[in-house]
Amino acid sequence: MFSRPTNPVSHRLARFAFFLACAAALIVVACGPVHRWLGVDLDLVLIAFRYGFYAATAAIALALATVIPTRPGEHRRGFVAAVLALAIGVAAAWSPAQWLLQARAAPRLNDVTTDTARPPAMVVTQQMRKGAANPPAYPGESAAALQRAAWPDIAPILLPLSPAEAFKRVDRVAMALGWEVVARAPAEGRLEAVDTTDWFGLQDDIVVRIRAEGTSGSRVDIRSKSRLGESDFGANARRIRAFTEKLRAEQ
């Protein structure tokens, strides 16, 4: 004869926490493909993403509250459900938590450049931005001030190379970073590319400008601009930093 659990409330709460964690994980994981492949509006997807995070944190709280009352022994049940709810809840909450922290830390910018006075101009990528929520024009001094306050290290890159050699290095680095190069104009000292995120499929446009500096060097400027969103959560600044580091290290 089966014995009844001595902790029926904790057992039910642990099971509820497990199902809630599974639902939260499903919501969080589905948000990216739903936007990327089904074209659901990004604002709606981000709302669902945020509520998926709330559901995951609720599941974590319930799991923590029930994991001890349901521990094995004396006909107690629900311990496995509580442990699984805790693990799945933490996994589901991790990515949204990272996004929320980045959103809090980053200024409301979606256009970052090493030259705020004369940002590299889009040519091919400007044509590709038709229908994008963010216009291709640089926002101006207000954006420049926010950028200087947030990322004072973002500056032009000086290389001891001729513009022709610098262009070749820029091209190699762009390919190594996985960007889709959409325009190469070495005579104009301009390279344009698109970088697409793996999960949400968000696209940012990139322009790199190479100019002669002094008698034998080059100055490289880069601009990275998101097509959607008032804030890029710092993605464009991270992209420019990665490009700068790799360009300087490239031999």
Image (spheres, grey):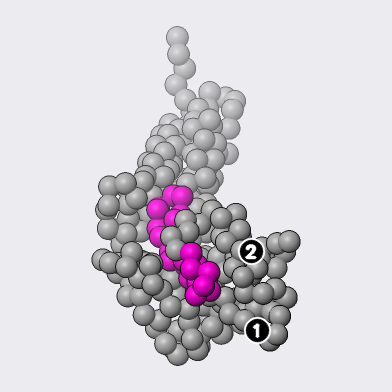
Q: Check the image and name the residue furthest to the front.
A: 187
The stretch drawn in magenta includes residue 186: yes
Task: State the residue in front, 164 or 174.
Answer: 164
Task: State the residue in front, 44 or 200.
Answer: 200
- At mark 1, the secondary structure is strand
Residue 52 in view here: no
Number of marks: 2
Q: Which residue is mark 1?
A: 213
Task: State the residue in front, 122 or 223.
Answer: 122
Task: Assign the N terminus to one quadrant of the image.
Answer: top left
Dot 1 alpha-carbon crowd within 10 angstroms: few under 14, some 14 to 19, many 20 or more: some
Residue type at mark 2 is Arg
* Rendering coords of residue 19 (x, y %): 39, 37
Residue 134 in view here: yes
* Rendering coords of residue 196 (x, y %): 44, 56
**Side of 55 relative to 84 (left or right):** left
Dot 2 alpha-carbon crowd within 10 angstroms: few under 14, some 14 to 19, many 20 or more: some
Q: Is residue 136 above or below residue 102?
A: below
Q: Residue 125 appears in which quarter of the rendering?
A: bottom left
Q: Which residue is mark 2?
A: 169
Q: Residue at x 44, y 49 (%)?
A: 199
Q: Residue 160 appears in which quarter of the rendering?
A: bottom right
Q: Residue 212 appears in which quarter of the rendering?
A: bottom right
Q: Residue at x 40, y 58 (%)?
A: 202
Q: Cα distance, mark 2 to mark 1?
A: 16 Å
Which region is colored magenta? Answer: 184-207
Q: Check the image and name the residue furthest to the top.
A: 1
Task: Assign the C terminus to one quadrant of the image.
Answer: bottom right
- At mark 2, the secondary structure is helix
Residue type at mark 1 is Glu
